[in-house]
Image (tube, coloured by chain):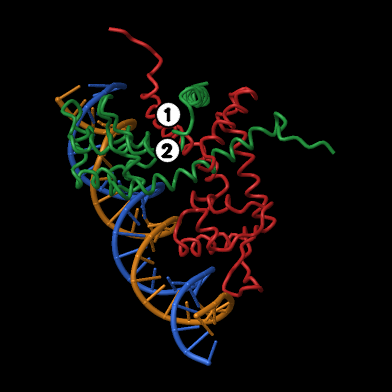
Chain colours: A red, B green, C orange, D blue
Amino acid sequence: MIETDVPADDQLLPLLVERVFSLSQNLKGVVGEILAELELTDALADALWQLDPAGPPPSMRQLAAGLRCDPSTVTFLADRLMERGLIDVRVDPADRRRKSVTLTPKGAETRQRLLATLTNRTSMNRLSPAEQRQLYALLSRAVAAT
Amino acid sequence: MIETDVPADDQLLPLLVERVFSLSQNLKGVVGEILAELELTDALADALWQLDPAGPPPSMRQLAAGLRCDPSTVTFLADRLMERGLIDVRVDPADRRRKSVTLTPKGAETRQRLLATLTNRTSMNRLSPAEQRQLYALLSRAVAAT
DNA sequence: CTGCAACAGTTGAATACTCCATGCATTACA
DNA sequence: TGTAATGCATGGAGTATTCAACTGTTGCAG
């Protein structure tokens, strides 16, 4: 019986999928700690994450698309973030049905702190810069359109 | 002003973290579809995932550790999985405080179907086998103990 | 052996999130 | 101009999650 560490090509993908799953489970722990420190829940952090200070402020509907959730859920989450003073929600003067969502300074700082803390604590910092580059490239390719 | 596509080493990790985040958001969509087809929720699928048919049956507490949740949550989830006939929960005769959790045949099949469907639909199948190998190695290294 | 501490799991209450159906205001357009 | 479509909010229901308190079991110091 021939034993080998290297799986055949057609066995590879399931292994990879399992790896990603357990990695994301693993991530859940680290992220959980950080969110507790920032007093954010998963859902609120996801929403905050969608609000890139660089890009144009999204509408509620665009947020829902980014979060892959029902628009009414965004209403709920936006209320919570507004209560915490992390976002502003304003009626779009050009189309008064729309509301555009922007980070407050406090919100931008919180979002930045989330990214910084994750960066500090991720186990990916064990990879060399070259490996990080490689990983970045592979993940980008794996998710590219078509 | 010098422009470059290649970020400096100390800018790399935040980019990587962002990439992983958006990838996991992206994943949420695909996984959501599949879980709907299998009539599972996120939480139930996570729990099912912990039950590797290969390994020894875990106790409720071990499941909680794997899922990084409160033991009482496992009680809740196990009830639901039992109702669906996907798992068996039996008192451990050696220590009657413990309960050991095993997949039923139906549970094992569902778990297998989950893995197979994910494997079929993951965008990672766009990577060549060589790239898949590379990715697998990098992810393994990124999560390895110390 | 006895009694107490530690452990495994459950229960109930409180909270968070999520979706769906419905409704309201605004806009697009035939 | 009136009708359809759009963007969002609201209310109700179902799912998940935690915490504190409780039950039953085991381990062990004396």
Q: Residue at x 33, y 39 (%)?
A: B117
Task: Count residues near mark 2 (Cα–Cα under 10 Å), then give few for <14, some for 14-19, many for 20+.
Answer: some
Image quadrant assignment for residue C21: bottom left
**Quick one: A134 or D22, which is closer to the camera?**
A134
For residue A45, side relative to residue B73 (left or right): right
Q: Is residue A2 above or below residue A37?
A: above
Picture coordinates of residue B142, whole percent (x, y): 53, 26
Q: Amino acid at mark 1?
A: Leu
Q: Residue at x 71, y 32 (%)?
A: B6
The chain ID associated with circle 1 is A
Picture coordinates of residue A102, whole percent (x, y): 64, 60
Residue named by callout 2: B122
The chain ID associated with circle 2 is B
For residue B116, side relative to residue A70 (left or right): left
Q: Judge depth for marks 2 and 1 and give the one in front.
A: 2
Whether marks 2 and 1 lie on the same chain: no
Q: Amino acid at mark 2?
A: Thr
| Residue A16 numbered mark, or none | 1
User: What is the C-alpha distance between the residues marked 2 and 1?
Assistant: 10 Å
The reply to whether dot 2 and dot 1 touch (C-beta < 8 Å) is yes
| Residue A142 numbered mark, or none | none
Picture coordinates of residue C3, whole percent (x, y): 23, 33
**Quick one: B51 or D22, which is closer to the camera?**
B51
Q: Residue at x 82, y 36 (%)?
A: B2
Total residue callouts: 2
